[in-house]
Image: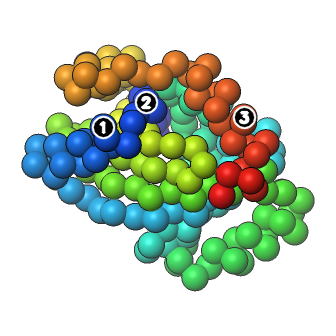
Amino acid sequence: MKNIEVEVRSFISEEKYKELIEFFKKEGKFVKEDYQETYYLDCKEDLRIYRTNSNSIVLLKKGKVHDYFREEIEIKFKREDFEELEKLFSNLGFNVSAKWFRKRFEFKWHEINVCLDYTKGYGYIIEMEKMSDENEKEETLKELKEKMKILSISITPKEEFDKKFLHYKENWRNLN
């Protein structure tokens, strides 16, 4: 069962972001343009609720934020259910640790999901991800790293993402 998300990511400049959008429109398959409002919930796991242009989602990613490999559980709801999901988790004692506002362009490229994101107060990012099973995850990671090299993009170290994410979580109210 392919329930392990394998993901690589990098901070990029606004110029590179625009360049990559044009590249993937030509070389990949455009999937969608989306706006996402994500609430990170304060708990020991990476638990989020978010609303897109088309639906609402509860997402649990096991492991640590920014790890290359994480088991992912995602449940979709109608877009208009977002406030009810927020109430449910609030009544269960989950506080919002950060709110995230992101514009996303999503593409398929060589069977890889490529997301080009701009998150208000956080920056421009490219993410490449592919679902894998436990036995194939290392090979999938190698493939994703090779694709980033083809694009001349260095993978941003996990420590840099962790530092910037912690800063965002501590200051998100002032950054938006």
Query: Residue 162 occupies which quadrant of the picture?
Result: top right
Q: Would you name the residue on which mark 1 appears?
A: 16
Q: Is residue 146 above or below residue 103?
A: above
Q: Give percent across and percent down for residue 163.
A: 67, 27
Q: Would you name the residue on which mark 2 appears?
A: 10
Could you tell me which secondary element the residue under label 2 belongs to?
strand
| Tag 3–tag 2 contact (CB < 8 Å) | no
Could you tell me which secondary element the residue under label 1 belongs to?
helix
CA distance for labels 1 and 3: 25 Å
Q: Give percent across and percent down for residue 2.
A: 40, 38
Q: Which residue occupies the foreground of this view, 173 or 6?
A: 173
Residue in the image at 43% along x and 74% along y: 54
**Which amino acid type is marked by label 3?**
Leu
Q: Is residue 137 left or right of residue 149?
A: right
| Res. 90 visible in picture | yes
Residue in the image at 41% along x and 22% along y: 155
Query: Residue 138 occupies which quadrant of the picture?
Result: top left
CA distance for labels 2 and 1: 11 Å
CA distance for labels 3 and 2: 16 Å
Q: Residues within 10 Å of mark 2 (few under 14, many from 20)?
A: some
**Which amino acid type is marked by label 1?**
Lys
Q: Give percent across and percent down for residue 130.
A: 35, 37
Name of the residue lying farthest toward the left: 26
| Tag 2–tag 1 contact (CB < 8 Å) | no
Q: Nearer the viewer, mark 1 or mark 3?
A: 1
Could you tell me which secondary element the residue under label 3 belongs to?
helix
Quadrant of the drawing holding the N terminus: top left
Mark 2 or mark 1: whose residue is earlier in sequence: 2
Mark 1 or mark 3: whose residue is earlier in sequence: 1
| Res. 127 visible in picture | no
Q: Would you name the residue on which mark 3 appears?
A: 166
**Which amino acid type is marked by label 2?**
Ser
